Amino acid sequence: MPLSRQRGDLAAIAVDLVNSWDEYDDPPELLSARWLRRWLAWHGLEAAAEAVSDDDVPRARELRDRLARVFDAADEDDAVERLNELAAELGTPPQLERGAGGWRLRSWPGEEAGVDGAVARAAVGLLEAIRDLGWGRFGRCDGAPCRCVYLDRSRNLSRRYCCHFCADRVAQAASRRRRRA
């Protein structure tokens, strides 16, 4: 699964980590120290990426599974509870710091926290997505057997697939079925 186009977006950090398990790759497990370095660097966490080792992979898998359970939650309250637990475990007390455009509030550890710091950012991003977009925007790909997740940012709530590859694959299969019939 390619990394999302929303480079550095907090919710995209979560989506990309959850999608590091891809049914169409052989083996489907993409998560490795190399992949973690690429993921962290893609989202602007270069210092964290440089510090990644093979010892970080089991922790990243555990955190990925916890984020995946958010997308499979029974309802919005369950998802928020899971994310709040993750943010409380990994986050830091909110801090006001100067950013490029003025002041900003930060509630996650610095890059020295590595994968934990990235997942803390991801949890905050998903909480913001629930607040701003609503729980109905969280989904799993309809292109079976793909199980990747997405955050629907479309205007009309029309997203059903994790990427164009899955959408095209499903459309082509439907076209072949119609031609055979």
Image: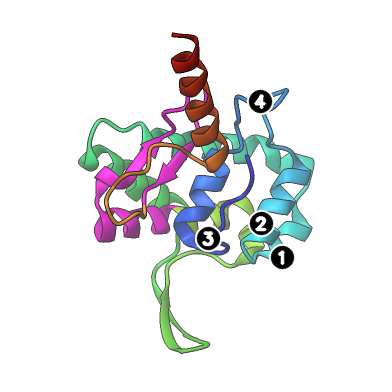
User: In terms of sequence position, does the residue under pointer 2 or pointer 4 come before the other?
Assistant: 4
Q: Secondary structure at mark 2?
A: helix
> Which residue is label 2 attached to?
40
Disc 3 or disc 1, which is closer to the eye? 3
> Which residue is label 1 attached to?
46
Q: Is residue 46 left or right of residue 119?
A: right
Label placed on residue 6: 3
- Within 10 Å of disc 3 (Cα), the crowding (few <14, some 14-19, many 20+) is few
The C terminus is located in which quarter? top left
Most extreme residue toward the top, as rendered?
181
Q: Which residue corresponds to the image point at 53% horizontal and 34% vertical from the top-left?
A: 168
Q: CA distance from mark 3 to mark 1?
A: 17 Å
Q: Amino acid at mark 1?
A: Glu
Q: Which residue corresponds to the image point at 60% horizontal and 31% vertical from the top-left?
A: 21
Q: Which residue corresponds to the image point at 66% horizontal and 56% vertical from the top-left?
A: 40
Q: Secondary structure at mark 3?
A: loop
Q: Amino acid at mark 3?
A: Gln
Q: Are the two marked residues, 2 and 1, in contact with CB atoms closer than 8 angstroms?
A: yes
> Which residue is label 4 attached to?
28
Disc 2 or disc 4, which is closer to the eye? 4
Q: Position of residue 62 (x, y in %)?
A: 55, 35
Q: Is residue 138 magenta?
A: yes
